[in-house]
Image (spheres, rainbow, N blue to C red):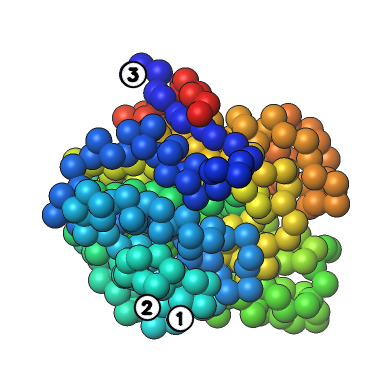
Amino acid sequence: MGVSKVYYTNMRTTLTENLLQKLARLVKRAGMMDIDFANKYTAIKIHFGEPGNLAYLRPNYSKVLADLIKEQGGRVFLTDCNTLYVGRRKNALDHLDAAYENGYNPFATGCHVIIADGLKGTDEALVPIDGEYVKEAKIGRALMDADIVISLTHFKGHEAAGFGGALKNIGMGGGSRAGKMEMHSAGKPYVNQKACIGCGSCKKNCAHGAITIADRKASIDTNVCVGCGRCVGACPVDAVTPMNDEANDVLNKKIAEYTWAILKDRPHFHVSLVVDVSPNCDCHAENDVPIVPNVGMFASFDPVALDMACVDAVNRQPVMAGSFLAEQEQNHHDHFTDTHPDTHWQSCIDHAVKLGLGNKEYELITI
């Protein structure tokens, strides 16, 4: 596979061009308008942000894409699937409330929100793929019913995958509840009893009753745990960790296989904004300060090259003083591995290349 093109623009503005206008210029230059949107159902896959989190993408960015697609006759909607963990996005009614609260409503975005896997996360399409780990991906039905998939991603850190980019936004985000359980099933965590302070944050954030507190120490019943990883990010003293690195490798490879299930056999295009790069996922109701300065906006037809370009751009940035990353040991020459040393983001990229999803080599075109 040849070198892929990734288009980039920084976050600087002028008196004649604001950020939204720059985004429109970026995606046009990157070729998004070459897609035939006329009378096609087009899903913009996005993360609406857990209420309380303020690092998620502003809805204004999604309106830029929605308006461009509608100008070409496309029938566009914003979408995401329900979550596994305790929070405001675990069913479609609460999820819609959360999306509206964060500004994702038709008045702000110019299009409707559809929760792809339905009321309780059970409305799924079964997609045969015969992958190395996944034989039948379980994808939110509305996402699979779309003719075209556009991903709009807030690029940030992630406590289990290493970082959250286009592949994770599509693969993990597109899985139904059963699909998310399948992806997480290899990555069940454990509690370091010496470090645990018995605060109960992990138990409060477990939707499956897998965590108990006894003698001011938490423990996890792995027979009940689904491996969603929410407790890992919830622990204030980092006492909850994945059992081993292999589990995170399997998680990342399953994310790649789910992404392939969603994107294969139909047009797709991808946009990532490397801004407010928080250490953890936007699923958290808190986001902490960014680990690096804002970088810019990236776009490509190749989600693998896009993720690589974003990783490389982040790793060229200085660490933000006072951030979570600044408190960690800088051993890996890799901001995401230094932020979450038990993760291995490269496994997702490499597996995606193996599947034919895209290319690690890219040409960065600055506009």
* Residue tagged 3: 1
Residue 69 can be seen in this image: yes
Residue occupying image coordinates x 29% and y 56%? 43
Kindly identify which residue carries mark 1.
97
Quarter occupied by the N terminus: top left
Q: Secondary structure at mark 1?
A: helix
Label 2's element?
A: helix
Q: Secondary structure at mark 3?
A: loop
- Residue placed furthest toward the front: 15
Horizontal side, residue 320 vs residue 52: left or right: right
Answer with left or right where residue 355 lies relative to residue 201. Answer: left
Which residue sits furthest top?
A: 2
10 Å neighbourhood of mark 3: few (<14), some, or many (≥20)? few
**Disc 2: which residue:** 92
| Above/below status of 236 relative to 86 | above
User: Real-space Cα distance between discs 2 and 1?
Assistant: 8 Å
Q: Which residue is at the far left?
A: 39
Residue type pointed to by label 1: Asp
The tag earlier along the polypeptide, 1 or 3, is 3
- Which residue occupies the foreground of this view, 127 or 241? 127
Q: Nearer the viewer, residue 35 or 205?
A: 35
